[in-house]
Image (cartoon, helix red, strand yellow):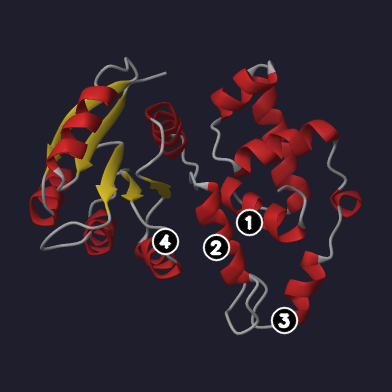
Amino acid sequence: MNKIRVALIEDHDLTRVGLRTALKNYSEIDWLGEAGNGRDGLQLLQNTLPDVAIVDIGLPDLDGIELTKLFKDFQEQNPNSLTKILILTLHDTEAEVLAAFAAGADSYCMKNISIDLLLEAIKATYEGNSWLDPAIARIVISQVQTPNLKTEKGNNPASVEAENNQSVENYSLTDRELEVLQLIVDGYSNAAIADQLFITVGTVKTHVRNILNKLCADDRTQAAVRALRAGLVG
């Protein structure tokens, strides 16, 4: 696996130093730099184009949500930039979570995450998968289940109820696929799932592909949302 080029935008000095020190100890990480505020952070991302940018949501002068919006606008004009945004926050409030994803964030996790899990989040984000803290995923589910919000199937509450009533049998998931699905919802990358279940990464990819097909999902995040909504996993 190629090294993951990472940049950090975090205003709290101790947190920034702690994350830098911890992540630089991993051979998988190529540390590009850091910034202590949103304006400098945006400049850093535009100059270095990291694979993954860890962005604190509560930045001074330009918060993480606005920074994400501005950088996504920059990416539209610069298609060579493939940077993924991983939002880091102390809060799991509905408004912040939904605003972050509306701005274009790719992943979202809490600051109390362990460094090992943060590394998994970085890897998953780098691989093109959205990493959601389970608490965050449940906020997303609570919103898509609200009848007055637009869902993937439109503004029809009946369509939401119908999907909620889907069962394991309807989706025809095997026991192993359900195990893999639960780990996807818990934020595990393919490599971490392989380690957890004592199978190869190739086997995990096969299971993930089957899960996406059976759930008619485009990606892992959509699969996680549908699985939680239907009660397939806890």
Task: State if disc 2 and disc 3 touch (CB < 8 Å).
Answer: no
Measure the C-alpha gap from mark 4 to mark 3: 23 Å
What SS does tag 2 mark?
helix
Measure the C-alpha gap from mark 4 to mark 2: 10 Å
Nearer to me, 14 or 56? 14
Kind of residue at badge 3: Pro
| Residue 63 spot, x, y in % from top left | 20, 61
In the rendering, which numbered label is found on residue 157? 3
Q: Which residue is mark 2?
A: 140
Tell me the residue at 30%/36% (across/down).
51
In the rendering, which numbered label is found on residue 101? 4
Q: Is residue 27 left or right of residue 198?
A: left
Q: Earlier in the sequence, mark 4 or mark 3?
A: 4
| Residue 7 spot, x, y in % from top left | 22, 37
Residue 162, by quadrant, is: bottom right
What SS does tag 4 mark?
helix
Kind of residue at badge 1: Val
Q: Which residue is mark 1?
A: 225
Q: Is residue 109 above or below residue 143?
A: above
| Residue 133 spot, x, y in % from top left | 50, 47
Tell me the residue at 78%/48% (across/down).
214
What SS does tag 1 mark?
helix
Q: Earlier in the sequence, mark 1 or mark 3?
A: 3
Measure the C-alpha gap from mark 3 to mark 2: 16 Å
User: Is residue 154 shown to the viewer in this render?
Assistant: yes
Q: Is residue 202 above or below residue 132?
A: above
What SS does tag 3 mark?
helix
Task: State if disc 1 and disc 2 touch (CB < 8 Å).
Answer: yes
Q: Earlier in the sequence, mark 4 or mark 2?
A: 4
Callout 2 environment at 10 Å: few (<14), some (14 to 19), or many (20+)? some
Measure the C-alpha gap from mark 1 to mark 3: 16 Å
